[in-house]
Image (cartoon, grey):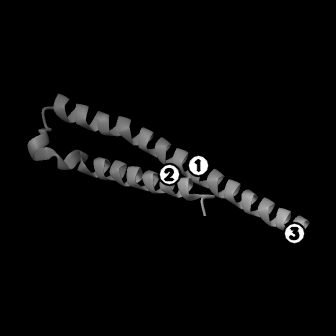
Amino acid sequence: ENASNLLVDVAEKTKEAGQKGILEYEIKKIEKEIENLLPVLGSEVYSGFREKKLEISKDFQEIHGLLEEIQKKEKLMAKKEKELEGVGTN
């Protein structure tokens, strides 16, 4: 019976470690995607101002899509971090 309990414990710990590893990987991937979007956003804003075609008050739509995408990824990353915190706390 003790061996059986030990095997169950080992299986649960292995499953938790796998879940944590997957979530950590997904979080890092999302962080990298956000990092890759930020230079694009900066470039769009800079180009708009340099070419005097961008005024935040009226032409905000030019960068709005990038900002939305970054916000979506930040929310997804926060969700994954919350899931990661919950792994193994059952």
Task: Report if the CB atoms under discs 2 and 3 are less than 8 Å apart.
Answer: no
Q: Which residue is mark 1?
A: 24
Q: Nearer the viewer, residue 84 or 61?
A: 84
Q: Measure how far apart labels 2 and 3 are at the Cα level.
A: 32 Å
Residue 10, given in percent of the width and then of the height, sits at 80, 59
View extreme (left): residue: 58
Q: Nearer the viewer, residue 6 or 40?
A: 6
Mark sitting earlier along the chain (1/3) = 3
Label 1 sits on a secondary structure element that is helix
Mark 2, secondary structure of its residue: helix
Tell me where residue 35 appears, x and y as whole percent.
43, 38
The residue located at (31%, 48%) in the rendering is 66
Q: Residue at the location (17% across, 32% down)?
A: 49
Residue indicated by mark 2? 81
Amino acid identity at mark 3 = Ser
Work out which quarter of the rendered image holds the C terminus and state it.
bottom right
Label 3, secondary structure: give it: helix
Q: Quadrant of the N terminus?
A: bottom right
71 shown above or below 6:
above
The local crowd at label 2, few if under 14, some if 14 to 19, many if 20 or more residues have their Cα within 10 Å, is some
Earlier in the chain: of badge 2 and badge 1, it is 1
User: Between residues 60 and 13, which one lies in front from this camera angle?
Assistant: 13
Q: Indicate the quadrant where residue 40 lies.
A: top left
- For image coordinates 9% across by 45% down, the residue present is 58
Q: Is residue 90 left or right of residue 75?
A: right
Foreground mark, 2 or 3?
3
Tally the numbered discs: 3
Question: Mark 3 sits on what residue?
Answer: 4
Task: Give the residue displayed 54% in from the left and 44% down from the top.
Answer: 28
Three-letter code, disc 2 = Glu
| Tag 1: amino acid | Glu
Position in image of residue 27 (x %, y %) = 52, 49
